[in-house]
Image (spheres, rainbow, N blue to C red):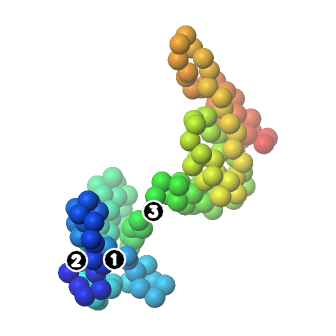
Amino acid sequence: GVGEREGRVLNRMVYERHYGLAHGIGRSGDISAVQPKAAGSSLLVKVCNFLVGDAFECAGIKEIGYVTTVPVATGMALTLTLLALKQRHPRAKYVVWPRIDQKTCLKCIFAAGLVPLVVENRLQGDQLVTDTEEIARLLAEKGPKGKG
């Protein structure tokens, strides 16, 4: 790291994976605040925020305002996405979930206070396939125009 508060990494593999940067982001409860004594991490966060903002503009999303990137793993990213969707659609309560053997999805649905509508896979020949007819049926029955 660059600053005196940058973490020191002893494990070579971890050092190479994280380019020697081991300091978190934010300061005193403000996730977008710069860490003056952790210049390397603070600079990378700023660059990342600008790159993400530029990507939104390239995608045609104008006037997005200030962008803050937050390092999260898959489960937290899914939970935050579901919570944002729930905030936009307060009456929504279901997530149509084509079944996969991965617990993270279910944990995220429950953490967001939603109810999973599990769609079991169908056996087609010697392979499992997504039951798209069941998904369409559930969307028609439980979706915004349905009664559920």
Residue 123 x/y as whole percent = 60, 17
Which one is nearer the viewer's eye here, 74 or 67?
74
Q: Earlier in the sequence, mark 1 or mark 2?
A: 2
- If the image is split into quadrants, where does the C terminus sit? top right
Q: Amino acid at mark 3?
A: Val
- If the image is split into quadrants, where does the N terminus sit? bottom left
Residue 42 visible, this orientation:
no
Residue 122 x/y as whole percent = 62, 20
Instruction: Kindly indicate whether the residue at mark 2 contacts the one at mark 3 (C-beta within 8 angstroms).
Output: no
**In this picture, residue 88 sits left or right of residue 5:** right
Quote the CA–CA distance across marks 1 and 3: 15 Å
Residue that carries the numbered disc 2 in the rendered image: 1
Farthest left residue in view: 2
Quote the CA–CA distance across marks 1 and 2: 8 Å
Which residue is depicted at the point 69% across and 44% down?
116
Residue 18 x/y as whole percent = 27, 64
Q: Amino acid at mark 2?
A: Gly
Which one is nearer the viewer's eye here, 1 or 92?
1
Q: Secondary structure at mark 3?
A: loop
Instruction: Kindly indicate whether the residue at mark 2 contacts the one at mark 1 (C-beta within 8 angstroms).
Output: yes
Quote the CA–CA distance across marks 3 and 2: 21 Å
Residue that carries the numbered disc 1 in the rendered image: 23
